[in-house]
Amino acid sequence: MGAEIVGISRDSIKSHHKFIENQALDFLLLSDPEQVAHQSFGVMKAKKMYGKEVVGVDRSTFVFDEAGKLIHAFRGVKAAGHAEKVLEALKEQ
């Protein structure tokens, strides 16, 4: 469909290389350990983990058009069925 996929996480580049290899991914994963992109996209949020409040990532997908304009934002993403939702959003364009 002409879309380019880029993933961003706080994990290290070394971790990304292992993940790409283990999952046989064919798209770019960017490392953002200082959370610069995470803060820019507003995906950091308070969460509870083992009864303690921590700051974590609100797993999200953002779809941009060819001009770089944000056209869809999916927040609180769960893996099951998400790819289909993104494909539908791309078809609408």
Image (cartoon, rainbow, N blue to C red):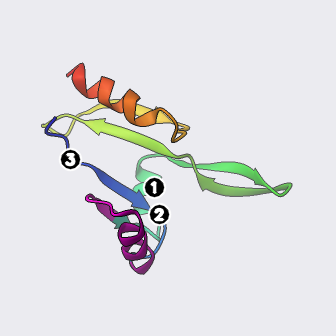
Q: Which mark is residue 35?
A: 2
Q: Which mark is residue 52?
A: none
Quadrant in the rendering for residue 14: bottom left
State the separation of the CA atoms marked 3 and 2. 22 Å
Q: In the depicted view, which residue is nearer to us: 20 or 43?
A: 20
Q: In the image, which residues are magenta?
A: 14-29
Location of residue 82 with respect to 6 vertically, above or below? above
Residue 38 is labelled as 1
Q: Image point 40% across, 28% down: which residue?
A: 85
Residue 11: x, y in percent? 48, 70
Mark 2 Cα shell of 10 Å, populated few (<14), some (14-19), many (≥20): some
Mark 3: amino acid: Glu
Residue drawn 66% across the image and 56% down it: 55
User: SS class of the residue under badge 1?
Assistant: helix
Name the side, left or right, on which 14 lies relative to 56.
Answer: left
- Cβ atoms under marks 3 and 2 closer than 8 Å: no
Prevalent SS, magenta region: helix
